Image (cartoon, rainbow, N blue to C red):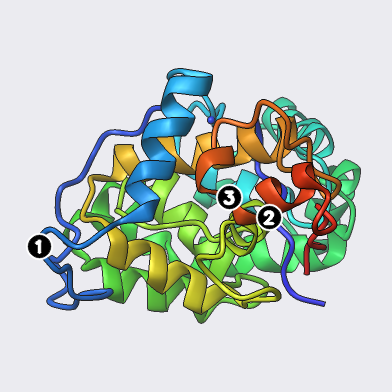
Amino acid sequence: MGELLKTPAPANVIADNDSMRDGTKEATLTPDAPRPLLDVFERLSRAYGPQDGWWPAESRFEVVVGAVLTQATSWGNAQLAIDALKRRGLLSLAAVGGTAREDLADVIRPAGFQRRKALTLKALSEALGEFGDDLSGAAGETTCSLRKRLLAIHGVGEETADAILLYAFSRPAFVADGYARRLFARLGLMPDGCSYAPCRTYAMGQASMKAGDWAELHALIVQHGAAACRSTPRCEGCPLLEMCPTGRDALSGSAPARRPLR
């Protein structure tokens, strides 16, 4: 079973227009080529409006902690664990690093899988410690290098790493979560059962956007996935119906609407 990150319901992020600072590109953008993802973005924006204040956090490190705690659980449970850390003064790199793993696990118990998550938080505090409690020291780190650093940490998969890059470090990244992969499959943009990396690469090859735009798109996709594009979708009135073969077939009765989330 792959990593499952339950994203909270989205935050303005300060755009960091350095998507190519690391000297690499996700994909080559072809001028004037059709870019369905931008059409998706525009349609969802008109339907749901601005998604301001989406990822609730008071600091960059709180975003990092939230991205770990929300794995395989609801945001409500993750928030209970974050609140417990705050009450005990443990919501900082130094505090997490200085707390015994068993004690940390006990505090974050509401988030579930507390021993594994405590191990990940301890590893994160060590790996990111040189950046300081406010993580401002990461400003000189390239996006590619920072992502590799995150992925090398026990318990941090691609989805968690990209969420941290986007929301904590304000780096352009596409979070190809379950909502996105399900949506892309139903739109015919990616095959059913597409894994994380191809979906991410496809999305980032569709547009060159600032971090704030990627965050807004992610928020809109999550909102749409919760409101309409569910496991059993609500296709009637969907803002993407015109470009969704799955939805059109379902409403015409020529094919089942459901494409399972894998």
Q: Residues within 10 Å of mark 3 (few under 14, many from 20)?
A: some
Q: Kindly report the distance in space between the C-alpha atoms of the residues bearing marks 3 and 2.
A: 5 Å
**Can residue 68 be seen in this snapshot?**
yes
Task: Indicate the position of residue 79 as horizontal and vertical percent values.
Answer: 75, 32
- Dots 3, 2 in contact, CB < 8 A: yes
Q: Is residue 123 left or right of residue 108?
A: left
Q: Is residue 87 left or right of residue 176?
A: right
Q: Amino acid at mark 2?
A: Thr
Q: Provide the secondary structure element on which disc 2 rests.
A: helix
- Point out the image quarter for the C terminus: bottom right
The residue depicted at 49 percent of the width and 26 percent of the height is 58
The residue depicted at 18 percent of the width and 78 percent of the height is 24
**Can residue 215 be seen in this snapshot?**
no
Q: Which quadrant of the structure image shows residue 187?
A: bottom right
Mark 2 or mark 1: name the one nearer the start of the chain.
Answer: 1
Viewer-nearest of labels 1 and 3?
A: 3
- What residue is shown with label 1? 31
The residue depicted at 49 percent of the width and 43 percent of the height is 218
Q: Which mark is residue 244?
A: 3
Q: Amino acid at mark 3?
A: Cys
Q: Amino acid at mark 1?
A: Pro
Task: Indicate the position of residue 106 as horizontal and vertical percent values.
Answer: 89, 49
Q: Which quadrant of the structure image shows residue 225?
A: top right
Viewer-nearest of labels 2 and 1?
A: 2
Q: Provide the secondary structure element on which disc 1 rests.
A: loop
Q: Is residue 151 left or right of residue 144?
A: right
Task: Indicate the position of residue 150 as horizontal and vertical percent values.
Answer: 47, 71
Instruction: Please tell me whether residue 208 is drawn above or below residue 12 in the rendered image.
Output: below
- Point out the image quarter for the N terminus: bottom right
Q: Kindly report the distance in space between the C-alpha atoms of the residues bearing marks 2 and 1.
A: 28 Å
Instruction: Please tell me whether residue 151 is drawn above or below residue 240 in the rendered image.
Output: below
- What residue is shown with label 2? 246
